Amino acid sequence: MTNISTSSDLMALLEIEFDDVQPTRVSGSIAADERHHQPFGIVHGGLYTSAIETFASIGACEAVQHRGQQAVGVTNITDFLRPHKNGRLQVEANAIQQGRTQQLWQVEIRRPDDDKLVARGQVRLQNIDPEHA
C-alpha cells in the first residue's frame, strides 16, 4: 500500500498514523493542534471530516482491492460533538455494510486521555473499476 499519510499535502498535514488496516476495520490517529484551528481557537471541523473520509476510504479500498476495484466516497455526514484544542486524536472506522456496489462505514474520533467522543461520521462509498475513477 502507498504511504497514504504523505501522499499529498493534506495527508501530511493530518499526520495520519495507521495502527491497523483491515477490510472491515481501520484504526489509528491524527494530529490536532494549532495548525488545524479555525479562527476561534479550536480544531476546524474540516479536519474531522477529512479524517473520517480518509479512514473509511482506506478500509473500503482494502475490502475491494482483491476484485481489482477501488472505493470512492459519495456521501460524508460528520457530527461535531465537542470542541478540541490540542493533542493527537484516536480514529476508528468500522464497516457497517459491504455490498457488491456500495459500502457504508462508521467512524469515531476520540480523545485518548479520557476516551470522549469528539466527532463521528458515516461515509457511503461506491465500489468502482479504476478506469472509471
Image (cartoon, rainbow, N blue to C red):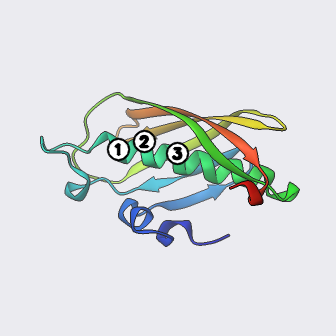
Front residue of 102/131: it is 131
Front residue of 125/33: it is 125
Say if mark 1 contacts mark 3, CB within 8 Å.
Answer: no
In the picture shown, does residue 61 fall above or below 101?
below
Q: In the image, 18: left or right of 21? A: left
Q: In the image, 35: left or right of 119? A: left
Label 1 – label 3 distance at C-alpha: 10 Å
Residue visible at 39% across and 59% down in the picture: 14
Say if mark 3 contacts mark 2, CB within 8 Å.
Answer: yes
* Amino acid type of the residue tagged 1 in the rendering: Gly
Which of marks 3 and 1 precedes in the sequence? Answer: 1
Q: Which residue is mark 2?
A: 49
- Quarter of the image holding residue 110? top left
Q: Is residue 112 visible to us here?
A: no
Q: Residue furthest right?
A: 67
In the picture shown, does residue 72 fall above or below 7?
above
Q: Which residue is mark 1?
A: 46
